[in-house]
C-alpha cells in the first residue's frame, strides 16, 4: 500500500478501499475508468450511510437463492470486483457452484491475464473468459464489449454482474437471463434493468451473499423458488430511493454539525 492509513482515521475503511483500487490500477487489474466509477459509487454510499440497508439484505437473500437454484450460474468479474473482493468471488463460487468468468468493459489480453492472476492467487480453479476462450458474442453490443465465453455467460441462466454497465445489463436481460447486480446507485440503468439489484457496496454485499448462500444451501429447490418468486425488485429500488430521501430530509431538518474534539 502506498500510504499508511491509521485505524483511527474517521474514513479509514473508505481510504483502504481506494488504496486497493489504486494498487489494482498499477497492476493493470483496474482500468482508469474503474477509478472514476468507484467515485460515483462512493458518492451514493455517502448518501445511503455506508451501511447495508434492510431492502439490500432482502435482495441478497433472493440473489443467493437464485444462484443456488440456477442450472448454470456465472459470476462475471471485472477489474474493480477483482481488486476489491477476490477471495469473496472464489468463496461465493464454491458455496453456490457458480462459474467464474472474466468479463471486461475495457478488454485487453493483459488485463484479462492480470485479473486471472489475482483470482488464481485467491484460490480460484477454473476461470472462464480469458483470451481466445471468450469466443462467443452477445448480440446488440459492439466490439470487444460483446465477447463472452461460450461455456459461461453465453449459456448461463443466472448471471451475477457486480458493477456492470447499463448497456450490457440490458443486452443480458434481452437474452432472457436473470441478472443480479450489486450497485450503489439505485438510479443507474443497471440497477433499474436487473432482475435483482443489491443496492450496497460490493465490499459489504459479497460477504453477506456468501453467508446467505451458506444458510440456504440445504433448502430444497422448491423452497428456493418460493424465495425468488416472493422477491420484488421494483420494491427494492423504491425502498433504496426512499431510504436516501428520508435520510437526507432528516439530516436537513436536524442540521449537520461536525464537532471538533478539543
Ligand atoms: P449505468 O451504465 O448502469 O447507467 P453508470 O454509467 O452510472 O451506470 P458505470 O460506470 O457504467 O455507471 O458503472 C459503475 C456503477 O458501479 C455505478 O453505478 C456505481 O454506482 C457503481 N459502483 C462503483 N463502485 C461500487 C462499489 N464499490 N460497490 C457497489 N457499486 C459500485
Ligand atoms: Mg454505464
Image (cartoon, rainbow, N blue to C red):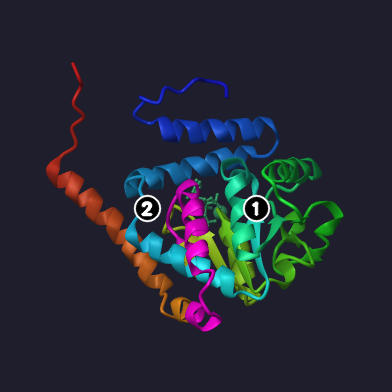
Task: Choose the circle earlier in sequence order: 1 or 2.
Answer: 2
Task: Label 1: state its secondary structure.
Answer: strand
Q: Nearer the viewer, residue 121 or 195?
A: 121
Q: Quadrant of residue 174?
A: bottom right
Q: Nearer the viewer, residue 220 or 49?
A: 220
- Rendered position, 212 above or below 257: below
Measuring from the top left, give residue 6's x and y in whole percent: 42, 22
The residue tagged 1 is 77
Main SS of the magenta part reads: helix
Q: Residue at x 37, y 25 (%)?
A: 9
Q: Is residue 250 left or right of residue 225?
A: left
Measuring from the top left, give residue 78's x and y in whole percent: 64, 49
The residue tagged 2 is 52
Q: Which residues are magenta?
A: 198-225
Q: Is residue 231 left or right of residue 3?
A: left
Determine if the magenta segment contains residue 200: yes
Q: Nearer the viewer, residue 241 or 157?
A: 157
Q: Quadrant of the C terminus?
A: top left
**Residue 194 seen from this side:** no
Q: Residue at x 64, y 34 (%)?
A: 25
**Farthest residue in the left direction?**
254
Task: Label 2: state its secondary structure.
Answer: loop
**Residue 42 seen from this side:** yes
Measuring from the top left, give residue 52's x and y in whole percent: 37, 53
Determine if the magenta segment contains residue 72: no
Q: How would you rate the neighbour count of disc 1 (Cα within 10 Å): few for under 14, some for 14-19, many for 20 or more?
A: many
Quadrant holding ligand 2?
bottom right
Amino acid at each position: 500500500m502506498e500510504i499508511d492509513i491509521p485505524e483511527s482515521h474517521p474514513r479509514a475503511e473508505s481510504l483502504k478501499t481506494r488504496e486497493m483500487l489504486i494498487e489494482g490500477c498499477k497492476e493493470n487489474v483496474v482500468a482508469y475508468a474503474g477509478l472514476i466509477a468507484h467515485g460515483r459509487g462512493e458518492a451514493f454510499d455517502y448518501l445511503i450511510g455506508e451501511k447495508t440497508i434492510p431492502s439490500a439484505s432482502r435482495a441478497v437473500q433472493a440473489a443467493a437463492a437464485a444462484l443456488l437454484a440456477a442450472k448454470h450460474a456465472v459470476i462475471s468479474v471485472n477489474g474493480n470486483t477483482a481488486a476489491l473482493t477476490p477471495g469473496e468471488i472464489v468463496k461465493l463460487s464454491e458455496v453456490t457452484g457458480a462459474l467464474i468468468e472474466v468479463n471486461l468493459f475495457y478488454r485487453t489480453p493483459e488485463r484479462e491475464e492480470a485479473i486471472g492472476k489475482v483470482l488464481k492467487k485467491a484460490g480460484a480453479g477454473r476461470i472462464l473468459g480469458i483470451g481466445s476462450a471468450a469466443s462467443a458474442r452477445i448480440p446488440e453490443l459492439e466490439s470487444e464489449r460483446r465477447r463472452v465465453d461460450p461455456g459461461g455467460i453465453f449459456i448461463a441462466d443466472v448471471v451475477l454482474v457486480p458493477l456492470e454497465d447499463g448497456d450490457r445489463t440490458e443486452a443480458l436481460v434481452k437474452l432472457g437471463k436473470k441478472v443480479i447486480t450489486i450497485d450503489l446507485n439505485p438510479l443507474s440503468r443497471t440497477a433499474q434493468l436487473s432482475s435483482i439489484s443489491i443496492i450496497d457496496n460490493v465490499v459489504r454485499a459479497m460477504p453477506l451473499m456468501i453467508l446467505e448462500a451458506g444458510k440456504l444451501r440445504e433448502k430444497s429447490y422448491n423452497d428456493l423458488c418460493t424465495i425468488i418468486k416472493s422477491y420484488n425488485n421494483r420494491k427494492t429500488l423504491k425502498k433504496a430511493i426512499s431510504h436516501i430521501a428520508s435520510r437526507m430530509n432528516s439530516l436537513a431538518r436536524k442540521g449537520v454539525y461536525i464537532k471538533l474534539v478539543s
